[in-house]
Image: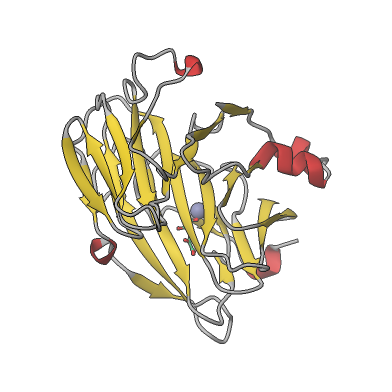
Amino acid sequence: MNQRYAQGPKEVAGLNTAELRENFLVDDLMQNDQFNFTYSHFDRAIVGSIVPASKELELPTYDNLRSDYFLERRELGVINVGGNGEIVVDGTAYSLTKLDALYIGKGAKSVKFKSLSADSPAMFYMYSVPAHKEFPVQLVKKEDAFPTTIGSKATANERTIYKYIHLEGAKSCQLVMGLTVLHEGSVWNTMPSHVHDRRSEIYFYFDVPDNQVVFHMMGQPQETRHLIMHNHQAVISPPWSIHSGGGTANYGFIWSMSGENLVYSDMDAVAMRDLR
Ligand SMILES: O=C[C@H](O)[C@@H](O)CC(=O)C(=O)O
Ligand SMILES: [Zn+2]
């Protein structure tokens, strides 16, 4: 498992492009038949993926967790961004079509992933954080994820937000997760931007068309930096940082948070005139 340490605003302000990418970009996701995980020291969040291309695969555990199984002291959110798939949790199967989510609580011993068609494998994105209480496994279909459209065409930020795991959705200890789909012609996510010092966040960009990119913005509102994101890459956002992006075409992204609370709307808005 890759490991990423936590940084403060002062240190990040001094990083060049390569250093910024080494610390915050996760670019090894969505490889066939291979689990890839990165452990961030911000809120001990783990981000990862599995594409079960040729066979059913079981979630392993890792030395740095010092656990008998991955979810011994953790909870997990999974969203499928590929073809039809299935997740079997301790013997019970759940079907996930594209953009469905599964919450798996602390204590689940066996988690297996499979695709329903070899031509179009499922692509499971995963986000896991420490948990202190067990909550039941819950499947959330895309249609049931409170779709809300915000922004406008005039400001190129018209987008639909789907909330899966949060205070009013699937129950969790501290994990909050959902996704946002930009409408055609709209390219700006999370603009106007915000911070939430109480929670860190990880963005995973998907459905970024070939030869298009997203300029992901991070840093304190008065000291912004950008990372150029390609399809199926994730970026860690420290609690003190904005997380916002402008694409060269429309795209989707999964947002995952953990920390003090489960309230989706707990954000401190940054006025446009205050951005630097
Ligand atoms: O804290 C919330 C997260 O940053 C995202 O949900 C924001 C987002 O999806 C958007 O505005 O498009
Ligand atoms: Zn946020």
For residue 196, say whether it is visible.
no
Q: Is residue 119 visible?
A: yes
Viewer-nearest residue: 109 or 8: 109
Coloring basis for residues: secondary structure
Q: Residue placed at 34% from the left, 22% from the top? A: 73
In the orientation shown, which residue stands out farthest toward the bottom? 154
- Report the residue at 76% width, 61% height from top: 276
Where 69 falls versus 170 (above or below)?
Answer: above
The image quadrant of residue 106 is top left
- Work out which residue is located at the far left of the displayed protein and give it: 92
Residue 197 relative to residue 108: left or right: right
User: Where residue 260 sits: x, y (%)?
Assistant: 41, 38
The quarter of the picture where the N terminus appears is top right
- Which percent across, then down, holds residue 174? 35, 37
The x and y percentages for residue 77 are 35, 42
Where does the image place residue 169, in percent across and percent down from the top left? 24, 52
Question: From the viewer's perspective, is residue 64 above or below residue 48?
Answer: above
Placement of 227 over or under 190, stated as above or below: above
**Which of the 4 quarters of the picture holds residue 137?**
top left
Q: Number of numbered discs present?
A: 0
Query: In the picture, residue 265 is in which quadrant?
Result: bottom left
Q: Nearer the viewer, residue 172 or 106?
A: 106
Q: Is residue 118 left or right of residue 138?
A: right
Lateral position of residue 112 relative to residue 233, left or right:
left
